Image (tube, grey):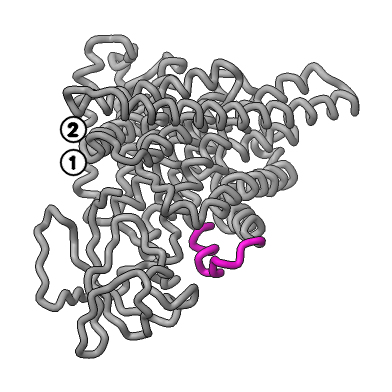
Amino acid sequence: MIPLSIFNIDLSASNLIVLVSLLMFIAILMAKVGTRFGVPTMLLFLILGMLAGQDGLGIRIDNLYAAEFLGHLTMTIILLTGGLETSVEETRPIFRKGIAISTLGLFLTILVTGLFIFYALGSRIGGAGTSILGCMLLAAVMSSTDSASVFSILRNSKLSLRENLGPMLELESGSNDPMAYVLTILLVNLLEMANHSQGAGGTWSLILLGGWVLIRQIAIGLIMGIAMGYAARWLILKIHLQSSPLYSILILSIALFANGAASFIGGNGLLALYVCAILIGNTEDLPCRKEVLLFFDGLTWLSQLMMFLLLGLLARPSQMHTILLPALLIGLFILFVARPAGIMLSLIPFRGISFRAKLFTSWVGLKGAGPILFALYTVIEGVDGSNEIFNIVFTITLLSLLVQGMTLTPVARMLNLSIEDDPKVETFGLELPEEMGMLRDHTVTEVDLERGETLRDLHLPHGIRVIMVRRDSRYIVPHGSLKLIPGDRLIIVLGDTED
């Protein structure tokens, strides 16, 4: 298709409103159709942006700085919503596991991937592939689990997982993006310094500097997030606003301030925002909790749509054929080697997680807007080979959303990790109003009772409640200390709950 040069769009132009509204409308229709076939909506938004972009209809965005700013802003909103919806009570049992795979697991994945790129594909990539630091940068940009993709697919597919995997995966993806962003910025700076340093002394200086910057970023991000989170909790409970939307706007302003303030003093702004949001979301007696979460849920959908459309518009499919084979090889290596190795090794100290749960965790290494935004950052900073980095990461993201995004539910069922295994729902005559949630049933198996025999030991995900247990011909009103046996039928309500 011949690009239409009349669509050389300036982000500040007034006609952008009409263009954006049209793209959003088409995206919603595509999402409706895609849902029927199990296609991730994020993938459809991304493809729509590509079709409308410079190699499609010809819409071209020249202001990369504005695009990066808008992308970063939408990512903060997605992380903010994820933090607000994270339950500390549910996360506490898996906190160490989640942090282990989002830090140690991430480092191991980057290390293994970077070495593979350098020794196997460096000469075919050029630019970034000519140095070990460049290969590590490429690995860091695309090795994180994207929070937007994980939050969207897990929650919208209503996939309920055993072994408390849902909260662990969301915690990993929420804390993973900030870590990957820190490492991306760090490696970009080290690459720039490496061009001006020589000898072993310069190498050791770079290593020491990199370690110091990493520690500083994480420490400042955590301190700022905790400080702003507790300050926000105090203010929200003290102030009395007349309208519920004002609480949502107040929370948004505080979280964005935590992000900006932490970045200004040399910390990780995304980490500060995420920690602040978790503390706010777990505030007891949070005013207008339901309304606040509904506000941010809608804002997150808008942010996801805008971000993936924008990133799709930035893509140049005509330039990707030269890196298609290396990108596919790297993507498959991450999917089947690097990510599983990082997960398995980082979870060695933990015994309360089965092998099949580790296997599924390694499969949920979804790529998305985060890696593409990090790749865009390398383009803005003028890193050698940054265009190749962007095209490789974009190709791998498409591969990940297509392969992993469309198979999460089947893989969970294949590994017997889905709590909704029985296709026929038996509710024993009980009915529930639609707005209260959905009724489901589940037959208790030996696998369910591996970690304990009581209902409490099942560690059911947030939003799931057992309201009745049928044992042979008996009906039992459940409680946490009820001992279960294989063959028990549980009647489960899936819906929103308030702490």
Q: Is residue 127 magenta?
A: no
Q: Residue 313, position in %: x, y?
A: 37, 27
Quarter of the figure with the N terminus: top left
135 or 478: which is nearer to us?
478
Alpha-carbon span between mark 1 and mark 2: 7 Å
Count of residue discs:
2
> Farthest residue toward the right?
200
> Farthest residue toward the bottom?
472
Mark 2: amino acid? Phe
Q: Which mark is residue 25?
A: 2
Do we see residue 323 in this rendering?
yes
Q: Residue at x 27, y 68 (%)?
A: 466
In magenta, the rendered stretch is 349-362
344 lies above or below 111: below
339 or 311: which is nearer to us?
339
Do we see residue 1 in this rendering?
no
- The quadrant holding residue 479 is bottom left
486 lies above or below 498: below
Q: Residue at x 58, y 51 (%)?
A: 101
Dot 1 falls on a residue whose secondary structure is helix
Look at mark 1 in the image and give the residue it sits on: 29
Mark 1: amino acid? Leu
- The quadrant holding residue 387 is top right
Q: Which mark is residue 405?
A: none
Q: Residue at x 46, y 26 (%)?
A: 228
- Density class for disc 1 (Cα within 10 Å; few <14, some 14-19, many ≥20) is few
In the displayed structure, does residue 63 sit left or right of residue 422?
right
In the displayed structure, does residue 150 sit left or right of residue 117?
left
Q: Residue 127, position in %: x, y?
A: 67, 29
Q: Residue 42, position in %: x, y?
A: 34, 42
